[in-house]
Amino acid sequence: MTECKQEVKSDFYKKKRLEVKFSGEQLSSDGGILLARQAEEKVKIIQGMTERISDTQEQHKIRHSMEQLIQQRVLQIASGYEDAIDSNQMRKDPILKIACK
């Protein structure tokens, strides 16, 4: 098997240094989510969507912001998980957790 030494660095995750290495271990098969997240950080489509959707729910009962919900859904669709039923399983994916603020 060919060893890949290329590293992918991101600039959206400021809490800790984020380094993607292709080491052969499989923690997630959805590494493309990070690239989609980095592109989103530059074009801000999700932010624009969030600003145009009014949230009439009682805010003290809300656990996740509208932006977080839209971000998760868009990134899942971009990764090929079109069905909302995948959300429960995907919430455990370490890459998706990093990509969603």
Image (cartoon, rainbow, N blue to C red):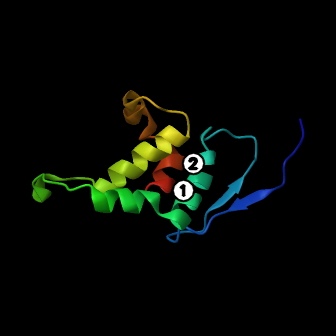
Front one among 30 and 40: 40
Relative horizontal placement of residue 34, taking residue 72 as reference (left or right): right
Figure quadrant of the C terminus: bottom left
Marks 1/2 in contact by CB < 8 Å: the verdict is yes
Q: For mark 2, what is the residue? A: 33
Q: Is residue 65 above or below residue 93?
A: below
Q: Residue at x 30, y 62 (%)?
A: 51
- Residue named by callout 1: 37
Going by the image, does 72 lie left or right of 55?
Answer: right
Q: Residues within 10 Å of mark 1 (few under 14, many from 20)?
A: many
Q: Amino acid at mark 1?
A: Arg
Q: How many marks?
A: 2
Percent position (x, y) of residue 80? 55, 34
Q: In the displayed structure, would residue 75 be above or below residue 90?
A: below
Report x, y in % for residue 63: 22, 53
Residue 88 rendering spot, x and y as whole percentages: 37, 34
89 vs 39, nearest the viewer: 39
Mark 1 falls on what kind of element? helix
Please tell me which residue is depicted at 37% across the width and 28% down the height of the picture: 85
- Asked which secondary structure carries label 2, the reply is helix
